[in-house]
Image (cartoon, rainbow, N blue to C red):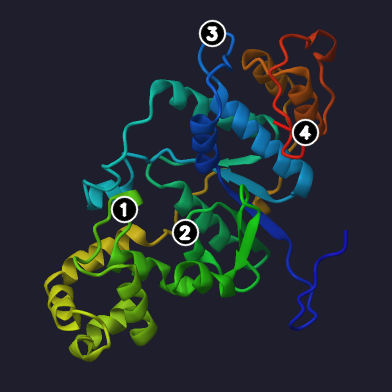
């Protein structure tokens, strides 16, 4: 296939590096699919079935050569929790039935020859950011996630893809979606807060006010350097806002540490270019058996893996296959 060409300067674009935020798709399946799917031990498998469906759609549609699947292992133990104990404290702990399915999802990716990124100290966002940072000289990023935090990583030729809604945007499209430019996203979330991650932000500074402040000053650092200008801005309560910004300056710096995606997370054992590796047919067959995937899903998995199914003659059983997104559910 010919390499895409930039319309701006007619220079071939570097190959895409697919970086998948796995957790959002595992959680979506956990909440949206019935728990009638069970593995050979009677544990629910609805999340792994839904994740497998998403993964198959992606692999069949894109046929990526350079791809990594990032998982969250630092939900309550990462470096951000050491900075701020209440980070993400508003979330309920994952039930054991869901934790087991995350393990299966990682094993499924490994069986398909996909690079799996996970670390006890860094979140999936950090692993995606670090992988993209390490490969900027050779690849353009295609981040598959709806998470607004990840938009801060976008530079020229990168894209973010909300796969479920089939919406894609580049660095120029971030402002239309979030009200600020890509390089301002971390500052924006530090100022107005992020309820999803239990980050308070500066009291009295909402999303619109944060966007206005960054439009005027450009960055949070410049805002604090020119804080005396804030009372004269056309913002409701600007004078009181300046007082709160001054009083909560140390908090603002802390919130920005939490909202900034790390670019130096360790990526041990990864192949250069995050090149897709050979699949493991025995592991894949064992997972299909243990998770009770039906014949259709099994065939699609082995086809996507590019290997023969060693158990095709004995793979028949209850058909718990999920249709592809192009088929009726």
- Residue closest to the eye, 329 or 28: 329
How far across and down, in percent of the image, does residue 206 sit?
A: 29, 68
Quarter the C terminus occupies: top right
Q: Nearer the viewer, mark 3 or mark 2?
A: 2
Above or below residue 317? Residue 187 is: below
* In front of the other: 51 or 132: 51
Query: In the picture provided, is 181 more to the left or to the right than 320?
Result: left
- In primary-sequence order, the first of circles 3 and 4 is 3
Q: What residue would you read off at disc 3?
A: 41
Give the residue pinned by disc 1: 195
Q: Earlier in the sequence, mark 4 or mark 1?
A: 1
Q: Residue 54, relative to residue 308: is it above or below?
A: below
Viewer-proximal residue, 89 or 79? 89
Mark 3 vs mark 1, CA separation in Å: 37 Å
Percent position of residue 27, x then y:
49, 36
Q: Which mark is residue 148?
A: 2
Q: Which residue is mark 4?
A: 305
The CA distance from mark 3 to mark 4 is 26 Å
- Label 2 sits on a secondary structure element that is helix
Residue at left 35%, top 50%?
196
Q: Residues within 10 Å of mark 2 (few under 14, many from 20)?
A: some
Q: Earlier in the sequence, mark 1 or mark 2?
A: 2
Of all residues, the one furthest to the right in this rendering is 1
Left or right? Give the position of 118 relative to 232: right
């Amino acid at each position: 296939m010919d390499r895409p060409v930039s319309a701006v300067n007619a220079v071939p674009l570097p190959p895409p590096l697919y970086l998948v935020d796995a957790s959002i798709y595992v959680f979506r399946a956990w909440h949206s699919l019935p728990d009638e799917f069970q593995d050979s031990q009677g544990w629910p498998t609805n999340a792994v079935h839904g994740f497998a469906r998403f993964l198959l759609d992606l692999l069949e549609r894109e046929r990526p050569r350079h791809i990594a699947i990032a998982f969250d292992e630092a939900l309550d133990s990462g470096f951000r929790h050491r900075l701020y104990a209440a980070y993400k404290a508003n979330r309920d702990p994952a039930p054991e039935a869901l934790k087991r399915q995350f393990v299966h999802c990682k094993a499924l990716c490994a069986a398909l020859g996909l690079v799996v990124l996970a670390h006890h100290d860094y979140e999936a966002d950090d692993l995606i950011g670090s992988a993209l940072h390490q490969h900027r000289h050779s690849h353009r990023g295609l981040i598959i996630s709806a998470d607004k935090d990840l938009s801060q990583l976008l530079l020229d030729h990168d894209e973010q893809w909300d796969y479920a809604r089939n919406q894609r945007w580049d660095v120029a499209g971030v402002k239309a979606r979030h009200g600020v430019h890509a390089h301002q996203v971390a500052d924006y979330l530090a100022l107005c807060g992020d309820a999803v991650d239990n980050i308070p932000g500066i009291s009295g500074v909402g999303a619109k006010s944060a966007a206005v402040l960054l439009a005027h000053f450009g960055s949070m650092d410049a805002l604090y350097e020119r804080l005396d200008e804030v009372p004269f801005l056309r913002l409701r309560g600007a004078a009181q806002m300046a007082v709160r910004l001054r009083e909560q300056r140390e908090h603002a710096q802390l919130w920005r540490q939490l909202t900034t995606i790390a670019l130096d997370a360790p990526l041990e054992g990864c192949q250069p270019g995050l090149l897709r590796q050979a699949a493991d047919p025995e592991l894949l067959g064992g997972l299909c058996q243990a998770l009770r995937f039906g014949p259709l899903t099994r065939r699609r998995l082995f086809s996507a893996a590019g290997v023969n199914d060693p158990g095709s003659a004995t793979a028949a059983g209850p058909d718990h296959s999920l249709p592809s997104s192009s088929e009726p559910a």
